[in-house]
Amino acid sequence: MSWLPYSRPIGARELMHTFESLIARGLLAENVPIGRLTTYKLGGVSRFFAEVLDLEDLSEVAKAAMAETTPILVIGRGSNMLISDRGFDGLTLRLGGSFTKIEISGSTVVAGGAVALPHLARQTAKAGRGGLEWCVGVPGSVGGAVAMNAGCFGTETVDVLLDATIFDLATGVTSMRGPSTLAMTYRNSDLDPEDLVVGATFRTDESSTEAAEARISEITRWRRDNQPGGTFNAGSVFKNPPGDAAGRLIDASRLKGRRYGDVTVSERHANFFVAGPGATAQDVYQLVKVVQAEVLESTGIYLEPELRMVGQFEPSDNGALA
Ligand SMILES: Cc1cc2nc3c(=O)[nH]c(=O)nc-3n(C[C@H](O)[C@H](O)[C@H](O)COP(=O)(O)OP(=O)(O)OC[C@H]3O[C@@H](n4cnc5c(N)ncnc54)[C@H](O)[C@@H]3O)c2cc1C
């Protein structure tokens, strides 16, 4: 399924009225910079933006959204997203408030869609449960993890997910879906663009706080030693092709250190592209295209982006792959 923003038809008068009333009530804002909500800290504004704090807010915004032609973008912690410099000409939704709660009881953890994965890992460990330690190294949200089937160190979200609570922005209906109905594959799921993950339940394992925290420290140390920490990036830019690693292929194509504008292929981890202070989102986009083309030429393998690129980019000056 495509994750791209979607549109639905409606008349202009209704649109103005609906948006005006939400703006007047403080539920919606106009021309909000959303690039800064991503880990790249690049990109422009969203024409409309709502941070929804509870289900009541969400259903208000959804009622308006249902009546709009405006595309919708759901943003989590923006750790796998590049917003174009031109921004996003639609409504961006982000969860906050009550969607940041965690409840640990017995062997399960119920977490709101906006919970940060590292926080989930640490709270679960603190409660003396294991199985979610890997989340400490993934700086996304619970909603983003379900949508992307995030994972590392041999575990993916699908392996620990019991169910996800999904609010359908197209109908306003909330439903619970088990992992088998979400078609969660490598860094993907079949969530529709209007499916907003408002919460999820995870299974945990027997552990002790000490053992789980030791594992968390081990993962944190590995990340510090092997990834360009403290920089502006969005983790892996490309998915690993079957049986290989995108980073290895980029390295083998002698692209470590390659720059476009002020964005560089990391020397530390070739599948991470690091943005410098003068970078634009377009620079990231161009570097994605350059690396994709050069890896294809030197290895014959087409690297599929894992990074979700939102909005309009200038055509690449990189010929056929633009
Ligand atoms: C330093 C670093 C290391 C990383 N390491 C890993 C790693 O080891 N493994 C890994 O898998 N990923 C990794 N990532 C990528 C990223 O953290 C994951 O893909 C994460 O799951 C994205 O979550 P997010 O909330 O930031 O989503 P966003 O980047 O905000 O959005 C990503 C996608 O999820 C959708 N989405 C977000 N929230 C929701 C929601 N509530 N409901 C429905 N859809 C939603 C968005 O619409 C978009 O399509 C890393 C990123 C960084 C910066």
Image (cartoon, helix red, strand yellow):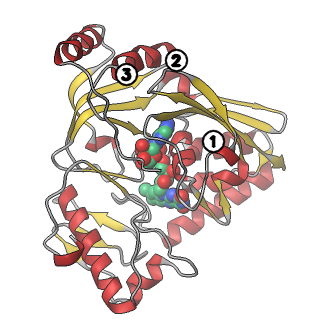
**Residue 280 place in picture, x, y as percent:** 18, 57
Tell me the element at label 2.
helix
Q: Which amino acid, by three-letter code, is at mark 3?
A: Met
**The residue at label 1 has a CB less than 8 Å from ligand 1:** no
Q: Which amino acid, by three-letter code, is at mark 1?
A: Leu
Residue at image coords 65%, 59%: 217
Residue at image coords 25%, 16%: 19
Tell me the element at label 1.
helix
Residue 299 shows in this picture: yes
Residue 89 as seen in the image, left or right of residue 247:
left
Q: Quadrant of residue 154?
A: bottom right
Residue annotated with mark 2: 55
Q: Nearer the viewer, mark 1 or mark 3?
A: 3
**The residue at label 2 has a CB less than 8 Å from ligand 1:** no
Mark 3 or mark 1, which is nearer the start of the sequence? 3
**For the image shown, how many numbered marks are present on the structure?**
3
Residue annotated with mark 3: 66
**Residue 213 place in picture, x, y as percent:** 72, 52
Counting other residues with Cα less than 10 Å from the Cα at mark 2, is it few (<14), some (14-19), or many (20 or more)? some
Mark 2 or mark 1, which is nearer the start of the sequence? 2
**The residue at label 3 has a CB less than 8 Å from ligand 1:** no
**Residue 261 place in picture, x, y as percent:** 15, 68
**Residue 317 place in picture, x, y as percent:** 13, 72
Find the distance from the CA under tag 3 to the CA under tag 2.
16 Å
Disc number placed over residue 120 in the picture, else none: 1
Counting other residues with Cα less than 10 Å from the Cα at mark 3, is it few (<14), some (14-19), or many (20 or more)? some
Residue 34 as seen in the image, left or right of residue 58:
left
Q: Which amino acid, by three-letter code, is at mark 2?
A: Leu
Tell me the element at label 3.
helix
Disc number placed over residue 42 in the picture, else none: none
